[in-house]
Amino acid sequence: MNPTRDDFDRPITRRERLALAAFLTVCSLVVLACDGGCARPPGMPGFHNVSAQVNGVAQVKLLCPGPVEMPLRVYVGTASIIGKRHLLTAKHMTLCHVPGSDTETMEPLGIAIDDGRHGDEVIIAHVARREAEQDVAQLTVDEDLKDAAPVAVGPRPTVGQTACEVSMFPRFGYRCGLVQPNVDGDNQIYLDMKVEHGNSGSPLYVQGSLVGVVVATITCQDKSYCVGIAEPIQGIPLLRD
């Protein structure tokens, strides 16, 4: 899922920073109640806002050069905090498109992290690792991310399991979906849930354990059925403190 104008930066309010501490608990309850492939209740809302302090998730701001009429562009996504100074996100949230090209990429002018607990300040991040065959990258920062906690990595989810993604942009909250068969034969995880521009890099959880990174979406069919795509992380050596 490449950045678009829908991902442009905007000021973050204090209310928006209060978002997701209850996420893992709530998500775990949803999964335990519907693990193994139970049907989604009719009319079940796809997105849930939660009013709690953000924990384990940060906003990623990618600074890129733009055309003459807009020389600086800022794209926004999400990252999961996997250590005091380490984060996991989508690889395309660490690379910029060369102005005028849809395929060539270049290093960004900068990457900033907002973990929601530094007031109006942001933390400068550096790319520590990009996966060659997956849309996954790891970032490091030069100061501790406040309230960072160890993250448990779970096994790859199976078809019929419920998985939940949590995002900080463009809306703050979480949504869950059922893992679908992968008809394309690649290594990615397919889910029956909508993924929005700005969700790139969001963590995917199953029963409180991190299992993937949200990277893309397939165009919704009649807006009634959507497919989100996540990269599995089970074979990736995560940087730890």
Image (spheres, grey):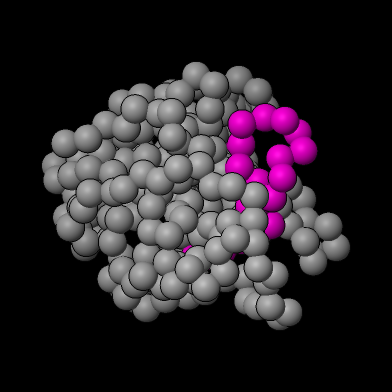
Residue 113 visible to the viewer: no
Determine the residue positioned at 77% across, 38% down: 183
Side of 128 where 49 appears, left or right:
right
Residue at 23 percent across and 49 percent down: it is 150
Name which residue lies at 37% across and 40% down: 88
Tell me if 227 is positioned left or right of 6 in this view. Answer: right
Q: Relative to the observer, which residue lies in front, 141 or 137?
A: 137
Instruction: Give coordinates of residue 195: x percent, y percent.
Output: 62, 55
Residue 29, compared with residue 56, is above or below; it is below
Q: Which residue lies furthest to the left in this view?
A: 143
Q: What residue sits 75% from the left and 33% below the top?
A: 184
Q: Where is residue 2 in the image (x, y as percent from the top left)?
A: 61, 39
Quadrant showing the N terminus: top right
Which residue, as the protein is rendered here, is positioned at the far front?
36
Is 158 in front, or is 195? 158
Please state the horizontal and vertical placement of residue 32, each as a whole percent of the image. 48, 68
Above or below for 94 versus 129:
below
Q: Answer yes or no: is residue 130 visible.
A: yes
Left or right placement of residue 160 versus residue 156 in this view: right
Q: In which quarter of the image is residue 61?
A: top left
Which contiguous range is marked in magenta? Answer: 174-192
Residue 139 in the magenta stretch? The answer is no
- How many marks the image carries: the answer is 0
Where the C terminus falls, by quadrant? top left
Where residue 200 appears, x then y in whole percent? 52, 46
